[in-house]
Image (cartoon, grey):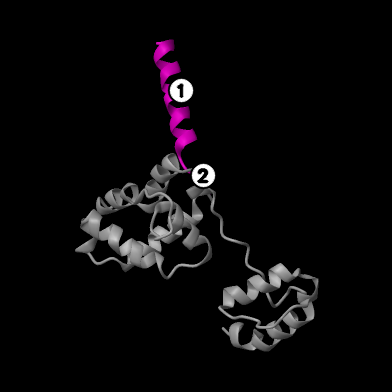
């Protein structure tokens, strides 16, 4: 009886270690959900079509989603590819959380991706931010600051574009 109890406790602890914790794989889960929403019902059943559509989807990704695509093999410049580990479970209608859990076993980097904390432009003092953060704001907006070298030039460009990008 004690042996059975010990085995049950060990089995439960192994399952708990392998399951995702809240906040784990946030980029993986959100990217797969976003991708799954683009698939038609017909394409959703065929792993080969899922892989082909994922490669097309990855061409339009940026930042963390692009890095996720790189790890999975969805980009042309990807060094390795584990698209089959994503496409087969997706064709079985497995939830994104479970797919990411399986992908984590293959490549831990996939679940180490985190979204950057968003800067609230209404409350933050832009003058206290580093140039790197100012460049990130412009990049997130899809804007550039051509010829900008000094911090003051980046601040001026952000102030010019702020009304355009902070409207509700």
Q: Magenta residues?
A: 1-22
Q: Where does label 2 land, which residue?
A: 21
Q: Which residue of the protein is positioned furthest toward the left in this rendering?
A: 42
Our reading of the magenta stretch's main secondary structure is helix
> Residue at the location (42% across, 44% down)?
101
147 to 114, vertically: above or below: below
> Residue at the location (61% across, 80% down)?
144
Task: Give the quadrant of the N terminus.
Answer: top left
9 to 54, vertically: above or below: above
Task: Give the quadrant of the C terminus.
Answer: bottom right
Residue 70 x %, y %: 45, 56
Q: In which quarter of the image is residue 127?
A: bottom right
Magenta segment includes 119 = no
Q: In this view, does 42 lie to the left or right of 153?
A: left
Q: Which of the pair 168/39 is nearer the observer?
A: 39
Callout 1 touching callout 2 (CB < 8 Å): no
Q: Where does label 1 land, which residue?
A: 10
Q: Is residue 133 left or right of residue 30?
A: right
Crowd rating for badge 2 (residues with CA inside 10 Å; few <14, some 14–19, many 20+): few
Give the mark, 1 or 2, whose residue is nearer the N terminus. 1
* SS assignment at label 2: loop
Please state the total of marks drawn on the protein image.
2
Magenta segment includes 18 = yes
1 to 116, vertically: above or below: above
Residue 6 x %, y %: 45, 16
Q: Give the Cα separation between the discs numbered 1 and 2.
A: 19 Å
Residue 37 x %, y %: 34, 66
Tell me the number on the disc at residue 115: none
* SS assignment at label 1: helix
Q: In which quarter of the image is residue 103?
A: top left
Q: Which of the pair 118/113 is nearer the observer?
A: 113
Residue 53 x %, y %: 30, 64
């Amino acid at each position: 009886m004690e042996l059975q109890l010990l085995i049950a406790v060990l089995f439960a602890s192994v399952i708990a270690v392998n399951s995702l914790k809240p906040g784990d794989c946030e980029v993986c889960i959100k990217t797969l959900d976003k991708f799954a929403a683009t698939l038609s019902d017909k394409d959703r059943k065929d792993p080969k079509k899922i892989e082909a559509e994922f490669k097309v989807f990855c061409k339009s990704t940026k930042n963390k989603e692009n890095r996720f695509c790189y790890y999975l093999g969805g980009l042309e410049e990807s060094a390795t590819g584990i698209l089959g580990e994503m496409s087969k479970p997706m064709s079985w209608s497995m939830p994104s959380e479970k797919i990411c859990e399986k992908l984590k076993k293959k490549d831990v980097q996939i679940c180490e991706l985190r979204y950057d904390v968003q800067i609230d432009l209404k409350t933050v003092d832009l003058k206290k931010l580093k140039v790197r953060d100012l460049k990130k704001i412009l990049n997130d907006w899809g804007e550039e600051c051509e010829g900008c070298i000094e911090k003051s030039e980046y601040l001026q460009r952000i102030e010019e574009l702020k009304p355009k990008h902070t409207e509700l």
